Image (spheres, rainbow, N blue to C red):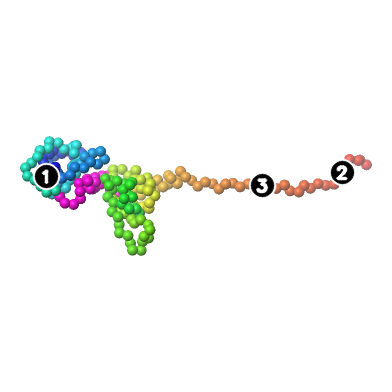
Amino acid sequence: MNHRRPIAARYTAADGRRSERTLHPHGLVAHAGRWYVTASDPTTGQDRTFRLDRITDVRTLPGSFEPPTGPDPANRVLTSLATAPYRHRVTLYVQATADHVHTRLPPGIAIVEELPTPDDADRQADGWSRVDLRVDRLDWLPATLASPDRPFSIERPAELRELVEALAERLARSAPPEPAPRVTAPRMAGPRMTGPRRSGIRR
């Protein structure tokens, strides 16, 4: 890779399909327990990310190439993972900085863009960030979004809004308001009425 030599390799995709590829590898990145290779495909001119454990039969080819300019390999891998095709595409807005959002949604999952702050906005409050992510399941997101205790607004999908509403209802049922304490007024003893005592003498 350091010699900037093209390679020919066989690659097995996630669905099991195999293909022969010519690649210009320019980065090797470890992420979440796996190794990834960033490479340019000279046939299509596109930059791609490949799982290293799915690459076999590697052969070095003649020639050399110049690595692409732009984001470093680590950022290319994170962007590739965050934009990979999944069942659900989620877009939402969070009143927090990108760094704060990434404490709950790592860069390999979410792409976060801090939005410009309006001139009339409160300078003491955090601005808003747009968050885009792709996931296979939505059921884990409501609790994750609620945990930072920051305002957020969901643009899509509608199913996520419904899940957030359902979570709010469950939380409300789990913590019902305490009933007001019942106050009992003390019993007051009234005056005792007594009549004249009768004599025990019979006439």
Measured in 3D between alpha carbons, the distance from the residue under mark 3 to the one under mark 1, in whole angstroms, is 93 Å
Picture coordinates of residue 150 (x, y %)? 38, 51
Label 3 amino acid? Pro
Mark 2 and mark 3 lie on one chain; the one further toward the N terminus is 3
Side (left or right) of 196 relative to 182: right
Bin the neighbour count of mark 2 within 10 Å (Cα to Cα): few under 14, some 14-19, many 20 and up: few
Q: Residues within 10 Å of mark 3 (few under 14, many from 20)?
A: few
Distance (Cα) linking label 2 and label 3: 35 Å
Sequence-first tag of 1 and 2: 1
Q: Secondary structure at mark 2?
A: loop
Q: Per the image, is 122 magenta? A: no
Task: State the image coordinates of residue 135 (x, y, percent, origin top left).
Answer: 28, 45
Q: Position of residue 44 (x, y in %)?
A: 12, 48
Label 1's element?
loop
Tag 2 residue: 198
Q: Secondary structure at mark 3?
A: loop
At x 29% / y 51%, what residue is drawn? 112
**Front one among 44 and 195:** 44
- Disc 1 marks which residue? 4
- Which residue is more in the foreground, 129 or 189? 129
Residue 186's disc number: 3
Against 28, residue 70 (above or below) is below
Residue in the foreground of this view, choosing between 203 and 127: 127
Q: Given the image, on which type of amino acid does mark 1 rest?
A: Arg
User: Is residue 62 in view?
Assistant: yes
Report the disc number at residue 49: none
Q: Which residues are magenta?
A: 68-91
